[in-house]
Amino acid sequence: MTNKLNLLLDTNSKEQLKGLVGEHLGRVLTESVGSEMALLAVLETKNRKVLIRNNVDLHFEYGDEFIQLVVSERTTAENNKHVSIPQDNGELIYELSTQYENLGTIAGIRIVNDRVEWENENGVFEAEADVAIIIDLDGGRQIIFQAVDSLAGFIAYCDDEEMLDSVEGQWKMKTDSLKSHSRTVNSMEA
């Protein structure tokens, strides 16, 4: 039996990202957990604050969890140092720190998409996943957010596209050997 996984950005996430194109990116704030690793990121423009996180999708039927990038508009506390995320039993409050400032105008957004197939003790898996978001800025600069396969839902962030994990690296927690794989980078239309 083949287990099919659809781990793509939802319509709301795509709309939130499209709405950023043409805006000045003032700051990127994160709840950092190490060097270029975070629990979430907030993109702050003059008019909006957009949250990027890896909302780990637990699949108990497979005995595993899978990455799931989610983008939503958020407000932060008056001091711009906290963001809250509603949970079933209340809310989680994250403390933010600034990673990048005064970055320039967002010229475009690209989505990194993997299509992979592997087999393990739980069966054969086919997954299509949006694994990273690339924010292209005027002047050729970029900021990248990549989902990390972890129970905590980490995202890696960097400003160099060459730092992206390879397809094999992205899926190494699921298998040592992918049966098939491909990666595409797609521009989002504003």
Image (cartoon, rainbow, N blue to C red):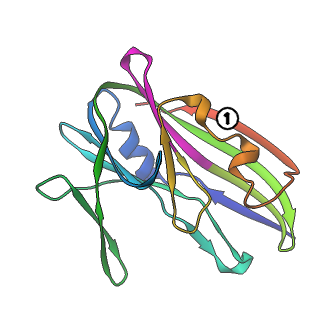
Residue sitting nearer the eye, 39 or 116: 39
Q: Which residues are magenta?
A: 130-145
Find residue 153 and report its horizontal and vertical position in percent.
Answer: 52, 62
Give the residue drawn at x 27%, y 38%. 27
Residue sitting nearer the eye, 1 or 113: 113
Locate the C terminus and report the quarter of the image it occupies: top left
The image quadrant of residue 98 is top left
Magenta span includes 1: no
Residue hosting label 1: 184
Which residue is farthest bottom? Answer: 89
The image quadrant of residue 138 is top left
Q: For this view, does 169 lie left or right of residue 76?
A: right
Give the residue drawn at x 65%, y 41%. 165
Give the residue drawn at x 44%, y 56%. 53
Residue sitting nearer the eye, 162 or 4: 162
How busy is the neighbourhood of tag 1: few (under 14 within 10 Å), some, or many (20 plus)? few
Give the residue drawn at x 72%, y 53%. 171
Q: For this view, does 80 lie left or right of residue 176?
A: left
Find residue 179 and report its horizontal and vertical position in percent.
Answer: 88, 51
